[in-house]
Image: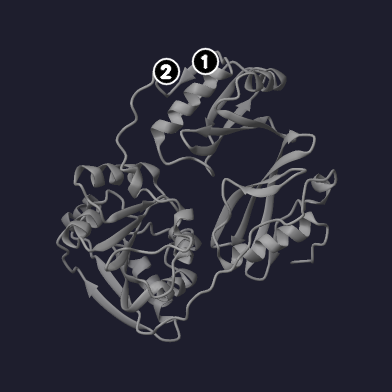
């Protein structure tokens, strides 16, 4: 990912230069007890953070992964611009020092997670592909079914960018791209709205099964968002994942399951083609939704009310992870912006689907940065726990 190595400058010098020319730097936050600084960036209508890490001999300006924008070109431009604003002496760089026109992105088809709050779909039907990789399958489906909206979920940023380019090249109007964790994304969708969910060749994670996309919580959410007759379709070359998925699907109180082995699809990925050449078995496991789900009302409020910064905040934040029934809260690092403003890096929610956020606390307002957590039950419970901790009224968890 883009970064530059520079001759280190003092924190005081950095802050003075940032204040002298405050575009695109909105704020500077110094880590407490760590040699790093967060730079709040506002560039081309995107708000995100850059991370400045330093030692006595070398420093680095790089992206911050929690808030990283999708467009790599935008990130490179922002790093380049900030380096000029801060008058860094560059030692090495993996970005171009000259500006180039950003690559063409079909930006109207790139959707942020916030776009799905109270979303309405202007299509006959909706389908989802989790982890679309090169995009061959979702592009084929979108071309074949123009009245169906296909939502592609992909955490690999370059793959998301490549699909956006293909959407523009092929002049498609029925694909949305979401660069997010699918396990969290499903909780944003209304009940009984989706006809198909494709999970093709997910990473097996044999050594870390908790990281698998397929799991009890994911399957329950899939059954909630699927219409009656809708399907969750897993395709895998992994014997272990196949058996694991069968176990998860069968754990449901009621399940209608279909199985196929070495069934040919009209379009396949390069990955699948490689396994076919090696005569490796490929399994399809389909779970059919045959019950209407109740409407899921999500009236979750992630505001902090009257909670503001106070001098005791740093003392009352627990150093250990607070684990409660169905959710957790962990405070990782504190950054100071001013005498009455701090940033807190935290993770929260469900252990199998953790969310990572920054929390701003000031004397006038408090909020999550860059946006609120996903409106899930676990996240809301964790938010209530955070409020109690900040207010000095934390109940004990294990």
Task: Classify residue 169 as left or right of residue 323.
Answer: left
Task: Classify residue 132 as left or right of residue 244.
Answer: left
Query: Residue 79 versus residue 27: which sits nearer the camera?
Result: 27
The coloring applied to the image is: one colour
Q: Is residue 320 above or below residue 18?
A: below
Q: Quadrant of residue 2?
A: top left
Q: Crowding near pointer 1: few (<14 within 10 Å), some, many (20+)?
A: some
Sequence-first disc among 2 and 1 = 1
Task: Classify residue 205 as left or right of residue 169.
Answer: right
Residue 303, position as x, y percentages in the image? 67, 57
Numbered marks: total: 2
Q: Secondary structure at mark 2?
A: loop
Find residue 90 and name its label: 1
Residue 100, position as x, y percentages in the image? 35, 23
Query: Residue 263 versus residue 185: which sits nearer the camera?
Result: 185
Residue 205, position as x, y percentages in the image? 43, 58
Q: Are marks 2 and 1 in contact (CB under 8 Å)?
A: yes
Q: Crowding near pointer 2: few (<14 within 10 Å), some, many (20+)?
A: some
> Which residue is labeled 2 in the image?
97
Q: Secondary structure at mark 1?
A: strand
For the residues labelled 2 and 1, the Cα–Cα distance comes to 10 Å
> Which of the two marks, 2 or 1, is nearer to us in this view?
2
Residue 1, position as x, y percentages in the image? 44, 33
Residue depicted at 49% across the width and 26% down the height: 79
Residue depicted at 46% across the width and 62% down the height: 183
Residue depicted at 63% across the width and 62% down the height: 301
């Amino acid at each position: 990912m883009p970064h530059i190595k520079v001759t280190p400058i003092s924190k005081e010098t950095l802050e003075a230069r940032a204040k002298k020319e405050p575009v695109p730097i909105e704020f500077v936050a110094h880590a407490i007890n760590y040699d790093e600084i967060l730079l709040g960036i506002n560039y081309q209508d995107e708000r995100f953070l850059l991370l400045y890490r330093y030692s006595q001999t070398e420093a680095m300006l790089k992206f911050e992964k929690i808030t990283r924008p999708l467009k790599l070109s935008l990130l490179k431009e922002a790093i380049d611009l900030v380096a000029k604003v801060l008058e860094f002496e560059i030692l090495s760089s993996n970005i171009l020092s000259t500006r180039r026109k950003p690559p063409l992105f079909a930006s109207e088809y790139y959707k942020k997670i916030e776009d799905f709050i109270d979303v309405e779909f202007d299509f006959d039907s909706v389908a989802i592909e989790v982890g679309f990789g090169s995009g061959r399958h979702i592009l084929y489906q979108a071309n074949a079914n123009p009245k169906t909206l296909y939502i592609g979920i992909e955490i690999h940023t370059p793959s998301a960018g490549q699909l956006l380019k293909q959407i523009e090249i092929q002049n498609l109007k029925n694909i949305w791209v979401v660069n997010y964790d699918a396990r969290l994304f499903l909780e944003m969708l209304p009940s009984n709205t989706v006809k198909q969910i494709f999970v093709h060749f997910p990473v097996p994670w044999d050594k870390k099964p908790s990281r698998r996309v397929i799991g009890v919580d994911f399957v329950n959410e899939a059954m909630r968002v699927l219409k009656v007759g809708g399907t969750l379709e897993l395709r895998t070359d992994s014997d272990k994942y196949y058996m694991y998925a069968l176990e998860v699907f069968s754990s449901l109180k009621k399940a209608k399951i279909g199985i196929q082995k070495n069934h040919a699809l009209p379009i396949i990925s390069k990955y699948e083609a490689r396994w076919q050449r090696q005569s490796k078995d490929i399994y399809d496991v389909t779970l059919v939704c045959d019950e209407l789900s109740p409407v899921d009302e999500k009236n979750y409020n992630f505001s902090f009310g009257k909670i503001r910064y106070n001098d005791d905040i740093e003392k009352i934040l627990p150093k250990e992870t607070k684990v409660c029934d169905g959710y957790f809260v962990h405070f990782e690092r504190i950054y100071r912006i001013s005498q009455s403003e701090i940033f807190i890096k935290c993770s929260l929610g469900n252990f199998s689907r953790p969310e990572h956020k920054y929390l701003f606390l000031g004397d006038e307002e408090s909020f999550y940065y860059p946006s609120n957590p996903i409106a899930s039950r676990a996240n809301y419970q964790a938010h209530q726990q955070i409020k109690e901790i900040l207010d000095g009224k934390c109940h004990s968890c294990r």
